[in-house]
Image (tube, helix red, strand yellow):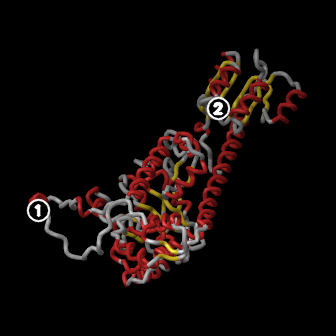
Amino acid sequence: MRDLDWNSFDVLVVDDEQDNLDAFRFAFRKSFRLHYALGGAEALSLLDRLDPAVIVADQRMPGMSGIEFLKQAKERRPDAAGVLLTAYADMTVLIDAVNSGAVDRYVQKPWNSKELAVVLRQAISGFATLRENRRLREQLAHYAGYLEREQRDPIDFGEIAGESEVMREVTARIGEVAKAATHVLIEGEEGAEKEVVARAIHVGSPREEQPFVKVTCAAFRGDALERELFGWRRGAFDGAFTERAGRLELAHRGTIYLDEPAPLTPSLQARLLRALTDGEIERLGSTETARVDVRVVLSLTPGIEEAWARAGVLPELVSRLSVFPLRLPPLRERREDIRALAEHFLRKYARRNARAATSLSEEAIAKLTAYAWPGNTRELENVVERAAILSRGDVILPEHLAFTARPQPAEPPARAPRAAPAAGPEADGAAGKPLAAPASSRPKLDLSSQLDDIERRELLAALERCGGNKAEVARQFGMQRTTLYYRLKRLGIDT
């Protein structure tokens, strides 16, 4: 373990006589971060808000002996080392106390300041080792959790395969870039299954056996995304009680998938650029540099790059992240793939829901093909899943297909050039102002997607309020934790 800063750990001193506390303060105030309590009752109250590395208690105190106090203190702060000061060599009592785990060390009075300083440093070192080992175990469990989720949720390439020429080109480009170490920028509308493509790139790369770490950036506001990516050192900010590795460290030698990382704070931009350029990161609050080898796959919705430019994102960072741009076409631009995708989703949900339906009628296929699909592949999956539940026979019919957002167009929309904008936007453009897209031309989500977005926002806000405590979020919404976990996974919220 690296050299410790003894002043960064709390030491609680408990005695019923103020003179003894003053003597301790005089001897050690420059060497340790000291807190004081007159008697066991006051000290127990202090432990509700103090997390000490060492608790030093005098044995002879009225009302509650030092051993009795340390036994109760261990129940509240089990990691803290208990040091007993005693002027009485009652070995039987001391042995029982040590065996019970309440007392880790004892020092006979009158104590020698140099010897007691050594005892305190050893106790702090033991506390720090205990916390460091626990942090490493948690980090390992966190990493193992990623691997377990990846094993339970295999990639289904049926969601990106297709017969259209444009998708054959996309899959060919995925195969080309997967073998390289290049960072990839995936651009696609909402619901275009960008994560499936990111996983396909990872699986097709030499990094396949290493972790694939997904970060839903919308779940983190303000500086929270920077903390999540780079981790932090204990005490780096309010609430940082333990040290934690960031997602970039967890993805070492593997792939990190950043889903919609906007906006980016200046500090995060600088840190991310250094990580991409030099492979070096530092946890928040730390000066220790760690090296990481991570491939970044970034997903953006159309127009985000322009928003980045307007927000002043570093050109070097944009250049690094967009070395290999990969555009996923919306479903309305590859209608010849709708049949294959719909049949793929039907097989998926027929197995999952044990339904009897095994095919779609030609009329149902025609209805699916005529729809505009503002929610893209994800919306198609939702429609087919509902149809698989509603059907009672072997074949899904048009009446089983529920489009709740808007009436279906009679025929696929023509791929004609856009009409000229109205006079107002033209005037703005002539004045040199950026043109805003007409509201009618912006993609509209179906009702299911809108409800998912509302639920996603509410859950993300609740997670932010509760500091990521899922049990508390479940209590606030009055639901079982298993139900909450299901909804978080369904909505793509990775916390």
Whether 137 is drawn above or below 148: the answer is above
The numbered dot on residue 43 is none
Q: Position of residue 177 (x, y in %)?
A: 45, 78
Q: What is the crowding at mark 2: few (fewer than 14 residues within 10 Å), some, or many (at least 20)?
A: many
Image side of residue 267 versus residue 117, left or right: left
Amino acid carrying label 1: it is: Glu
Image side of residue 263 versus residue 254, left or right: left
Residue 194 visible in the current orientation? no
Q: In percent of the image, x 25 and y 76: which residue is there?
A: 414
Q: In percent of the image, x 77 and y 29: which residue is there?
A: 71
Q: Observer-nearest residue: 222 or 482?
A: 482
Q: Position of residue 335 (x, y in %)?
A: 36, 77
Which element is circle 1 on? Answer: helix
Q: Position of residue 408 (x, y in %)?
A: 32, 67
Which element is circle 2 on? Answer: strand
Q: What is the crowding at mark 1: few (fewer than 14 residues within 10 Å), some, or many (at least 20)?
A: some
User: Which residue bears the numbered disc 1?
Assistant: 426
Whether 150 is drawn above or below 217: the answer is below
Discs 1/2, front: 1
Q: Quarter-wise, where is residue 413 in the image? A: bottom left
Mark positioned earlier in the residue sequence (1 or 2): 2
Q: Quarter-wise, where is residue 420 in the image? A: bottom left
Amino acid carrying label 2: it is: Val
Q: Quarter-wise, where is residue 50 in the image? A: top right
Whether 164 is drawn above or below 202: the answer is below
Image side of residue 432 versus residue 186, left or right: left
Q: In percent of the image, x 47 and y 78: which residue is there?
A: 180
The numbered dot on residue 11 is 2
Image side of residue 277 versus residue 423, left or right: right
Q: Observer-nearest residue: 138 or 230?
A: 138
Q: Position of residue 400 (x, y in %)?
A: 46, 67
